Every structure is written in structure tokens, then in C-alpha cells.
């Protein structure tokens, strides 16, 4: 029985890196344009320096005679809300996300599994204490003033 257990453990140790690699290859890059959960905005994720950042390029809310503003009174159009995203060993991108409505900054991780829908998890301290949003790819057009039209 001891030989069977040790043989099983040896096989598991050989297969584990292969399984982790298979998981890693099914995650795609988050670079591109993404429609936020609830379709309230469009975020472009692209390289900025040695990391990735996410900038608002589309907004669905428009107050009368004004633009949607963050907590500091700045227009949300072209606001950077994802910062310093770096790919880590778990094959997820880690950085920070800012809530433009209240200015709170949270740790963030994001990944794109095989279904092509970006997962963004904002949290405090540990990913277990957070929530995950689903962002589908944005296929429409966004104007420089942040008005956008999505393709159904």
C-alpha cells in the first residue's frame, strides 16, 4: 500500500505543473475594449509603461448640460480607473481599481478565461473579500467625447 501511495504522489507531482500550465494557457490577455457590467461604460485596457492600465472611453450616463464627473469633480471620460496591472504567477493580472463615484481604491485582479469574458475582482486585503464583475468584449464604437454605440 505504501508503494501505491508514493507512486500516486509522484504521478501527481509530475502532472500538477502540466495542469497548472493548461489553466494558464486558457486565460487570454485583457488588452482591448470591454463593456462594463450593467453596460454603463466602456474601458480600454492597454499598455502604459511596463504595466497595463484601464481608461474609460465610453459612458452611458449623461447629466443634463454637463458630463459625468468623479468624486473630485473631474470628468469621468478618459479617467484611468485600472492601474499598474501586472501578470503574476497565478496567470491573473493584479493592480488596483478606483471607483470614480466615491474615489475608493481597491486591490484588483482580472483574467480572461476561455469564454472571452473579462473577470474583474475588486477586493480589500484578500480576493476572498471582494466581488467579481463580468465584462464582455466591446464590439461597438466609442467617440472621443465618450458617447458610445454597442453592437447587439
Image (cartoon, helix red, strand yellow):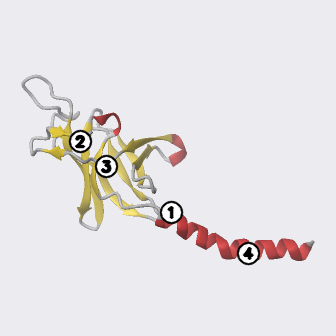
Residue under pointer 4:
11
Q: Is residue 103 above or below residue 88?
A: above
- Residue 3 x, y percent position in the rendering: 88, 77
State the image coordinates of residue 115 (x, y, percent, origin top left): 44, 52
Label whose residue precedes the other's in the sequence (2 or 4): 4
Quarter-of-image position of residue 57: top left
Q: Looking at the figure, which quarter contains the C terminus?
A: top left
Residue visible at 27% across and 33% down? Answer: 101
> Residue 86 location, x and y as percent?
37, 62
- What is the distance, in whole Å, between disc 1 and disc 2 at their CAs? 33 Å
Residue marked by disc 3? 137
Say if 19 sits above or below 129 in the image.
below
Mark number, residue 90: 1
User: What label sits on residue 151 in the rendered view?
Assistant: 2
Q: Earlier in the sequence, mark 3 or mark 1?
A: 1
Above or below — where is 111 with respect to 37? below
Between the C-alphas of marks 4 and 1, the distance is: 22 Å
Q: Nearer the viewer, mark 4 or mark 1?
A: 4
How far is mark 2 from mark 3, CA to CA?
A: 11 Å
Measured in 3D between alpha carbons, the distance from the residue under mark 2 to the one under mark 4, in whole angstroms, is 48 Å
Secondary-structure class at tag 3: loop
Q: Which mark is nearer the camera, 3 or 4?
A: 3
Residue at (29% x, 60% y) in the render: 52
In the rendered image, the residue lying farthest to the right is: 1
Amino acid at each position: 500500500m505504501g508503494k501505491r501511495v508514493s507512486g500516486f504522489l509522484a504521478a501527481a507531482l509530475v502532472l500538477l505543473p502540466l495542469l497548472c500550465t493548461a489553466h494558464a494557457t486558457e486565460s487570454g490577455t485583457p488588452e482591448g475594449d470591454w463593456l462594463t457590467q450593467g453596460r454603463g461604460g466602456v474601458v480600454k485596457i492597454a499598455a502604459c509603461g511596463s504595466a497595463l492600465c484601464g481608461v474609460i472611453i465610453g459612458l452611458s450616463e449623461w447629466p443634463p448640460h454637463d458630463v459625468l464627473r468623479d468624486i473630485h469633480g473631474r470628468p469621468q471620460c478618459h479617467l484611468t480607473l485600472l492601474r499598474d496591472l501586472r501578470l503574476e504567477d497565478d496567470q491573473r493580472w493584479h493592480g488596483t481599481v478606483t471607483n470614480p463615484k466615491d474615489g475608493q481604491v481597491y486591490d484588483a485582479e482580472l483574467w480572461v478565461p476561455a469564454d472571452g469574458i473579462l473577470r474583474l475582482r475588486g477586493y480589500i486585503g484578500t480576493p476572498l473579500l471582494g466581488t467579481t464583475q463580468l465584462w464582455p468584449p466591446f464590439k461597438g464604437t466609442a467617440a472621443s467625447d465618450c458617447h458610445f454605440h454597442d453592437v447587439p
